[in-house]
Image (cartoon, rainbow, N blue to C red):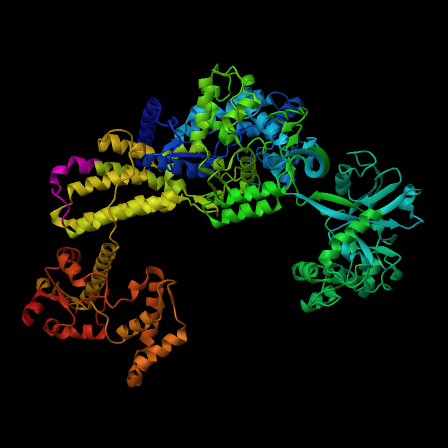
Amino acid sequence: MSSYPDAGKSRARRDRLLKIQSDVQKCWEESKVFQAEPGSKLPDPGEKFFGNFPYPYMNGLLHLGHAFSLSKLEFGAAYHRLRGSNVLMPFAFHCTGMPIKASADKLAREIQQYGNPPVFPTSEDASSAEVVADDSVAEEAAAVAPGKYKSKKSKAAAKTGMQKFQWEIMRGFGLSDEEIAKFQDPYHWLTYFPPLAKKDLKAFGLGCDWRRSFITTDMNPFYDAFVRWQMRKLKKMGKVVKAMRYTIYSPLDGQPCADHDRATGEGVLPQEYVLIKMEVIPPFPPKLKVLEGKNVYLAAATLRPETMYGQTNCWVLPDGNYGAFEVNDTDVFILTARSALNLAYQNLSRVPEKPTCLAALSGNDLIGLPLKSPLSFNEIIYALPMLTILTYKGTGIVTSVPSDSPDDFMALQALVTKSALRAKFGVKDEWVLPFKIIPIISIPGFGDKSAEKVCADLMIKSQNDKEKLAEAKRMTYLKGFIDGVMIVGEYNGRKVQDAKPLIKKKLLEEGSAVLYSEPEKKVMSRSGDECIVALTDQWYITYGETEWKEKAAKCLKNMNTFSAETRNGFEHTLGWLDQWACSRSFGLGTRIPWDEQFLVESLSDSTLYMAYYTIAHLLQNGDMYGKEISSVRPEQMTDEVWDYVFCDGPEPKSDIPPALLSRMKQEFQYWYPLDIRVSGKELIQNHLTFSIYNHTALFPEHHWPRGFRCNGHLMLNSEKMSKSTGNFQTLAQAIEEFSSDATRFALADAGDGMDDANFVSETAKSAILRLTKEITWMEEVIDSQSSLRDGPPSTYADRVFANEINIAVKETEKSYNAFMFRDALKSGFYDLQLARDEYRLSCGAAGMNRGLLGRFMEVQTRLITPICPHYAEHVWRNILKKEGFAIKAGWPVAGTPDPTLRIANKYLQDSIVLMRKLLQKQGSGSKKPKKGTAPSPSAENKLTVGLIYVNEHYDGWKEQCLRVLQSSYDPQTRTFAPEEDINEALSSCFIEHEADFKQVQKLCMPFIKFKKDEARTVGPEALDLKLPFGEMDVLEENLELIKRQLGLEHAEVLSALDGAALALAGPHVSVLNKNPPSPGEPVAIFMSRQEFGGQN
């Protein structure tokens, strides 16, 4: 039972919206309102609107994060439909890639290990049980929202926490054990989740043409044929090549791990190092005896090969775990097992892909090894201990160049100055003390021993002072690369940035170093495997190729990205994006047509499918799986047919009926180019940029996309959405709790920019109340029309209300056009509600105008239709009794807004508020009777008379200030002359009255600042000597409203410049002298009827 008394009523309101939702959706379905058909000729600008959304991955249920991004497209499409555009908004379901296959395989392993249904180990047993779900459990528990959040649990906590097994994840979807077992078959996922997603989206009210829906993979033979055509065409154009490249790779999956195949690490790229071969000089110590007869090297990964001249030693982690790994028949590298695994997949292992460890070693075993290192001026250097080495970066072996590395400098100084530290690790003096810092690079501002200088400047005392050392590196590394000059070696005198690639080349050619790559950061595949970098021979799409990149940049230049941040993201991605691995061997999808051992990678079959939407219904006959009997068979969709439809190729020789071929081509040419694609911002770095590239390669320029709009992620009640914390909601749950329209309302209110937005449950609950109360109010207005005022709008309140309606129409139109839906909600609903409430209060006994209220109800309904279409449809048809559908009712016609009238009304409302405060102050200031005595007659002393004094022109020092500002103002830039010029002009105005100037100077400065700020905002009219309307006229026209609001019996509006009018104030004239009225600031004096009568 609910803990609050209004819960039942709230549920009743919610249930009313759900009933409206159901009825409206049934009506839409019957009338096929969202089925889009092309016109008979190519559309004029604005005649059609084609928008789409990246199809979601079908390994779970849709959630509010999906709904948030999708709502941007849904609201925009609904707005264009309302305006009369022919709108196509399709929706499809992505099943390509490895997440579904990995989850299905995981289920199968769990059943094999624990039975069907499985009996999992208890939490007490978890520490000893080998859990099949492995290290990615916490991330896999988030399979409903891939990439949206990441568990912060440790490995141990994840294993003992909730949903550590795939079976438990499936139970979280409400599935029975009997049903779960079916998900061992990956294709069962494809038949289960897409229909559920479609059901939820229909309940959401998505204005989708479902005939064009499809799933990916070869389960849909038509889409499979489309992707095969696309890949063949790219290859024919030379944009798909086979080559050896470094790529992020999953050893468990046996294939590259692209962004959408990752549980964590999306966007992470390979980081290339130069691996310096430091030869261990015989004789070998006992721990290395097994390596005798081999060439043994400590292999150190560096990003700065140009500094190798300055080596004084190398570093190892004393407690680190190392191994001696065979590189080939003669060479052995000593490094960490993690780096050895990377090398094994980069053709640097005697047994490919299987590192062979000849000896397990600790860092202590390596301390004191004599080494011969390439380029070092020291013939022999030694391996020494460093306690801050990170074994998850590089090889665990670190070069030491104390002249240019602050870390190396501080670590070496510690060993030089602390004999106890040397003794602790068994470091002999001769391994350390003879070695001096070797200057190798001169850096402006830091000299030729930059590390020593920056450490002194920052007063770094220890190698453990991580923050200061990080700052030291920030200060010197980039400057050293850009401005540094080599002062040693064969490239003496050359700039570091020029010498670095030459030195790298020299080391590689001499065999003194090899190239090594690893992931920039940790990457986990959705199979639970930690990824490495592999040198793979596979198929690549040649993104980044110069001519293609220029076409992509041209496309982007002409696109609407809706924000500078989005455009910057695309420009940055175009700057770094290079060849992309487009093939893999594990998962679901389409086979690469010329090399069927591989599948097309999941981000590479998703770049052009917007075009497929235009003809999907003609191929699939409304079946998302493409299995229904239609007029076309998949094998008939040859490359020649696809070229004819999409690329204006010659008419193909085909047994497809010519009329149908012609219709396909007409559909594509009518709907293309796509007008907008809406997506989360994380897809800029891959999918969206790929889409630009593919469109520019395969389609002519007039079919390139017109706009991409990106948004941030969605928080739920100001916290990150996360299943593990319980702060998570599926789309179906939100609709059930709030209704579709209240959910949409809160999504519109959540935010529109690239920053993360916030879905607030209280906003959705408030929307339930607002919408249902508005329905009730409109029903009451319709039922009581006879009591409303007839005739055309005539009063001041009428004019103001009509003007607010016009403003709402214009402002909301601007917001919808800019895809700024929170602003549209504000101007089209919140502000209109306030205007209606103010109108109701302002009308008084005269009553509200019937025609104006009717216009308000019609306009408000149309403006809210894109966001709350079910509510709007109900009001339109059942309350306002209008014909047709609200969603196609047309944008309301509005007169030109009168900004002066709005300003005048704000002045009126602000003045009433100010006068009410003055009245309360004057009333509370009158003498109160002593306790126990009878009060004086209240009728005689009550303040019921108001005299409102107005000065419509600035005068005195304010006039002088304004005239100075007018002469100092540039209306084009809305800027002012420098402060000193304004002050000089002011002082000259008061030159004959220097004493007066000093007195008013303190008042001038705040007034000038206020007016300058106002002019920057509203323009030069802020500097006028009077307001753009007659203050006395506004107040006099609304005296009845003022009297009613303040409870006065009599009120007058008087000029503060009229002596006779001032005399009416009697002794209260001191108030006017102390605070004289000025434009926009009337002053009211209140008195009793008796006092007013006595003075007159």
Is 1040 above or below relative to 342?
A: below
The quarter in which the C terminus is drawn is: bottom left
Task: Determine the image quadrant of residue 451.
Answer: bottom right
Left or right relative to 378: residue 627: left
Is 133 above or below relative to 1084?
A: above
In the image, 47 versus 650, the foreground residue is 650
In the image, 1028 versus 18, the foreground residue is 1028
Q: Is residue 790 magenta?
A: yes
The quarter in which the N terminus is drawn is: top left
The residue located at (14%, 37%) in the rendering is 785
Q: Position of residue 815 (x, y in %)?
A: 36, 45
Left or right relative to 1062: residue 519: right
The span shown in magenta is 779-794
Q: Position of residue 239 (x, y in %)?
A: 63, 35
In the image, 676 versus 745, the foreground residue is 676
Left or right relative to 662: residue 984: left
**Is residue 319 in sight in this rendering?**
no
Q: Position of residue 924 (x, y in %)?
A: 20, 65
In the image, 1059 versus 408, the foreground residue is 1059
Task: Determine the image quadrant of residue 43.
Answer: top left
The residue located at (56%, 41%) in the rendering is 551
The residue located at (52%, 14%) in the rendering is 655
